[in-house]
């Protein structure tokens, strides 16, 4: 009986202790300050400076883009006019020459001998002509006095005609020999630069044997093929902007000729765009592109084609206003080139100075905060030909 009473007393004491602990815990919780619930910061989109463009007015042009290689307007193949052994070649590749300058000398000893032979034949023919002339004049006087017959005079006159013809023939042979001797010295037909040299001293060449190639680089033409679908849009005299590999700036050219025939197999027409080259920087064979303006509109607000998206039947761009990304509906017009690359006219929806995302990054969340990576400044983008598309990613918190 005593043990049972002791157990009940101990149990009651334990319950009292638990109750006192609970009351103390509630008092401590009531005295502690209330902590607000944690909130998650909204994400932000981070762009590179090249992803953002400031919309500005430009001259928008519809252009026809052509490509081709440069060729010299004036060029010449220098060939041998006489056969013989080459004695001297006085120029090398890359050397500038003047019109009439001596380029090659061919052995002239045989042609000098032929000239002397022709000159001797001419002297003999002239002597025979002098004798025939005197005989004819003497016979003319004799036939007038009746001392000789008319037939004898006619024979003397015929001998004179033969001697005169022989003189003319000898003179022709002398001229031919003189020309052959002159042609043994080869001169430049045009001013230009030696592009190739096909012979060396000691080689024997035949008539029309190729010796040198000359190219006049002062005027060059871009030879470009134009599709027949576009040929009616261009005409001689139109200006073109020509960009060549290796040159930082564009050159101004103009269409000078259009071939009247299409090229077999390609159905295109060769067009020649002349480009001046006064300083000789350009070289024949350089590859380039030409932009021919078909129509133009000044003061046009334009954006890159990649900035425009079709969403839910609407044409939109992503604009940045008050540091937030917003979807802006726009109305577009003509397509062309605004001096930086391909562009689309904006008729409604944007104002000059607006900031937009200049490439198609897919559907982006509206209202999200926007900032530039690495603390960059938003500025007009560089020419779009050099722009690299970079995807926007949520910025690290």
Image: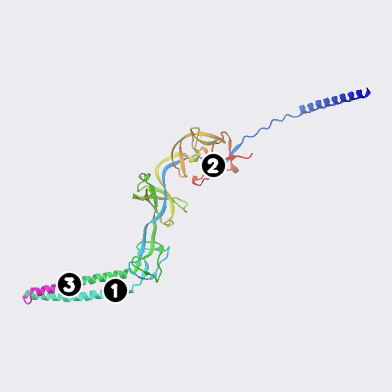
Residue 94 location in percent, x, y? 43, 62
- Mark nearest the camera among 2 and 3 is 3
The residue pinned by badge 3 equals 162
Quadrant of the rendering where the C terminus is positioned: top right
Q: Is the magenta stretch mostly helix, strand or loop?
A: helix
Q: Residues within 10 Å of mark 2 (few under 14, many from 20)?
A: many
Q: How crowded is mark 1: few (under 14 residues within 10 Å), some or many (20 or more)?
A: some
Tell me which label, 3 or 1, sits earlier in the chain.
1
The answer to whether residue 51 is above or below residue 83 is above
Q: In this view, does 357 lie to the left or right of 166?
A: right
Q: Is residue 162 magenta?
A: yes
The answer to whether residue 103 is above or below residue 362 is below
Between the residue at mark 2 and the residue at mark 3, the CA separation in whole angstroms equals 96 Å
The residue pinned by badge 1 equals 114
Residue 19 location in percent, x, y? 83, 25
Q: Is mark 1 on a helix, strand or loop?
A: helix
Residue 140 appears in the figure: no
Asked if the residue at tag 3 contacts the one at tag 2, i.e. Cβ–Cβ closer than 8 Å, the answer is no
Q: In this view, does 347 lie to the left or right of 1?
A: left
Asked if the residue at tag 1 contacts the one at tag 2, i.e. Cβ–Cβ closer than 8 Å, the answer is no
Q: Quadrant of residue 8?
A: top right
Magenta stretch?
A: 145-166
Name the disc covering residue 51, or none. 2
């Amino acid at each position: 009986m005593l043990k049972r009473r002791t157990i009940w007393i101990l149990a009651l004491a334990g319950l009292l202790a638990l109750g006192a602990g609970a009351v103390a815990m509630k008092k401590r919780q009531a005295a502690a300050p209330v902590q607000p619930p944690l909130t998650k910061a909204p994400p932000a989109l981070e762009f590179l400076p090249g992803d953002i463009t400031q919309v500005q007015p430009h001259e928008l042009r519809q252009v026809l883009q052509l490509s081709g290689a440069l060729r010299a307007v004036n060029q010449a193949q220098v060939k041998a006019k006489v056969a013989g052994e080459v004695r001297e070649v006085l120029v090398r590749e890359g050397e500038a020459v003047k019109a009439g300058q001596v380029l090659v000398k061919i052995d002239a000893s045989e042609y000098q001998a032929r000239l002397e032979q022709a000159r001797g034949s001419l002297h003999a023919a002239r002597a025979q002509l002098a004798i025939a002339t005197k005989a004819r004049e003497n016979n003319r006087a004799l036939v007038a006095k009746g001392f000789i017959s008319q037939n004898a005079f006619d024979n003397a006159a015929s001998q004179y005609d033969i001697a005169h013809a022989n003189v003319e023939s000898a003179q022709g042979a002398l001229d031919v020999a003189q020309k052959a001797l002159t042609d043994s010295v080869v001169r430049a037909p045009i001013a230009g630069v030696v592009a190739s040299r096909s012979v060396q001293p000691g080689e024997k060449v035949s008539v029309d044997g190729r010796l040198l190639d000359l190219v006049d680089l002062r005027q060059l033409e871009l030879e470009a093929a134009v599709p027949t679908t576009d040929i009616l849009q261009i005409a001689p005299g139109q200006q073109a902007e020509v960009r060549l590999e290796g040159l930082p700036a564009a050159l101004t050219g103009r269409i000078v000729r259009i071939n009247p025939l299409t090229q077999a197999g390609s159905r295109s027409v060769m067009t020649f765009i002349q480009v001046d080259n006064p300083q000789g920087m350009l070289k024949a064979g350089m590859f380039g592109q030409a932009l021919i303006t078909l129509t133009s509109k000044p003061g046009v607000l334009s954006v890159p084609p990649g900035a425009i998206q079709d969403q839910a039947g609407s044409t939109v761009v992503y604009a940045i206003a008050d540091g937030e990304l917003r979807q802006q509906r726009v109305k577009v017009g003509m397509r062309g080139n605004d001096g930086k690359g391909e562009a689309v006219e904006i008729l409604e929806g944007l104002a000059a100075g607006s900031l937009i995302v200049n490439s198609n990054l897919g559907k982006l969340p509206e209202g999200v905060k926007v900032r530039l990576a690495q603390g960059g400044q938003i500025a007009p983008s560089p020419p779009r030909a050099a722009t690299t598309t970079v995807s926007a990613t949520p910025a690290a918190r």
